[in-house]
Amino acid sequence: MDRFALRTEKLNLYYGDFHALKDVNFHVYSRSITALIGPSGCGKSTLLRCFDRMNDLQEEVRIEGDIYVHNEKLRNIDIINLRKKVGMVFQRPNPFPFTIYENMVYGLKVHGMANRRTMPEIVDRCLHSVGLLEELKDKLHTPALDLSEEMKQRLCIARLLTVEPEIILLDEPCSALDPIATMRIEELMMELKERYTILIVTHNMQQAARVSDYTGFMLLGILVEFGETSQIFTSPRDERTEGYITGRYG
Amino acid sequence: MRINPRITNSVVRWLLNAQAYFTVGILIVIIAIIFVKGFPQVNFAFILSFPQDMGRHGGIFPAIVGTIQLALLSILLATPLGVGTAIFLTEYTRESAFTKLIRFGVESLAGIPSILYGLFGFIFFVIKLKMGWSLLAGVLTLTIMILPTIIRTSEEAIRSVPRQLRIVSYSLSASKWETIKKVVLPAAMPGILTGIMLSIGRAVGETAAIIFTMGSSLRLPLSLMDSGRTMAVHFYILAREGISMEKAYGTAVVLVLSILFINIIAYYIMNKTIARYS
């Protein structure tokens, strides 16, 4: 297994004239949780979205520098394969307005990865991974939008797992959830890191401290500091990091 | 002098109430008149037998068949065209002078009185393309007429599908077309169906555009090139030419019941949409 699941070299990104990412050299270790923290607008979500090319959906985005996914240059990877390998969980839970089962098999159908007979088994396995199987196994054919926010977010993670990604990007996945639901999702992340590489963007520093192995601190498009989470939170090397962590700004 | 807000409040509430009851009241009165005058005419024989003596006696079977043929065929033509246009406008173009022009064209089409569609259909399909008074000419004219409704309602329905759902679909590595086919259209389907239902209602109730293009033959239209008449046209001719007011009202009852039925289905689907997204 590669040491780095994701890596950038001198990554620069512009939205039109706005220089959103500046010379970012960043890496994500395989099978670990890496957190990106920083104040709003610092570029952490932009950086996250580079890895599954979600920025492509926006107009006038220009990217310079190199991005690697498992040592393969991102621009050499076909976008369909890339997004299969690198999955994304969004800020707001966003199940499709279909039944739970239809949500779960969406990715499988798109990829032609399973047939009618193997699908139920995959659905069960992935729901089990996110701890939803017990509660939902009799409700698979009810609307997904009837679930609580936390369960919707779990469902979205389960839906992602069906296509067997290697890397999971989470874009502030708990910001729409209450503290108890947040705690449960965090526990889920800890379990998932056994099998997946996780990169999470969060504006909640405590969350980064609780779940992540590595933390990157960003400010105004610059990756100010990157290191083991314990080091970042106890003895930051850069005074800007220290300022943010101790709450002097942010 | 300042009027006590409590009084204004109750006056306004009373007025608004009255307006609502007025609307429903008119509907009830119209339906009541039609039913009182026409219902005695309606029975199985009336529905299933052919008219005799220009419609003075007998039933309205060919008109019912003609109505169904016309509505069904024009919906079958207009739906793919209209939904396709809506998909193009919402998913494949950015707002530009070109889309504005298309949208302006669609809105203008929607505002044209139906008799002008009839006239156009007559000049173009019946005369120029030598179709004669025929089901085909009627269908084509009606298709053009209901197209704007289908485009507008489909566009609204597609636009109301949250952008987030498309992004998720892409993130699950679906292509654009797969996203449209498997997420956007299913999510927009109730809204699209509502538009189709409303168009059927319009097609069923139309007269002016039909008389000029499909003609008013009392025979059962058996091919696309046959002339025929719809219930609305049948009603119009019976009443206009004083052939039989009783039969006219009988036809009206069947017509009103079909439109009511279509509207009920449209409402049912609309409510389902709302239930699904809220």
Image: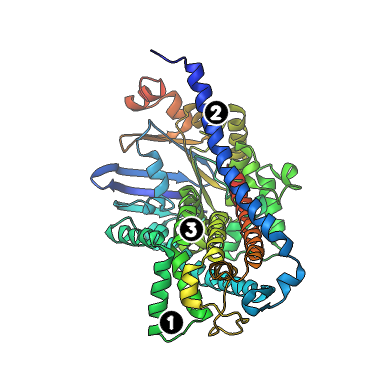
Which one is earlier in the sequence, the residue at label 3 or at label 2?
Answer: 2
Residue annotated with mark 1 = B126
Question: Which residue appears at 40% of the width and 73% of the height?
Answer: B119
State the colouring used for the structure image: rainbow
Judging depth in this view, the residue of A167 and B176 nearest the camera is B176
Judging depth in this view, the residue of A29 and A57 nearest the camera is A57
Residue A110: quadrant of the picture: bottom right
Name the secondary structure under disc 1. Answer: helix
| Chain to which the residue tagged by mark 3 belongs | B
Q: Mark 3 or 2, which is nearer the eye?
A: 2
Distance from the alpha carbon under mark 1 to that under mark 3: 30 Å
Q: In this view, does A57 lie to the left or right of A81?
A: left
Distance from the alpha carbon under mark 3 to that under mark 2: 37 Å
| Chain to which the residue tagged by mark 2 belongs | B
Q: Against B103, is A15 above or below? A: above
Question: Which residue appears at 39% of the width and 26% of the height?
Answer: A236
Judging depth in this view, the residue of A183 and B85 nearest the camera is B85
**What numbered label is drawn on residue B14?**
2
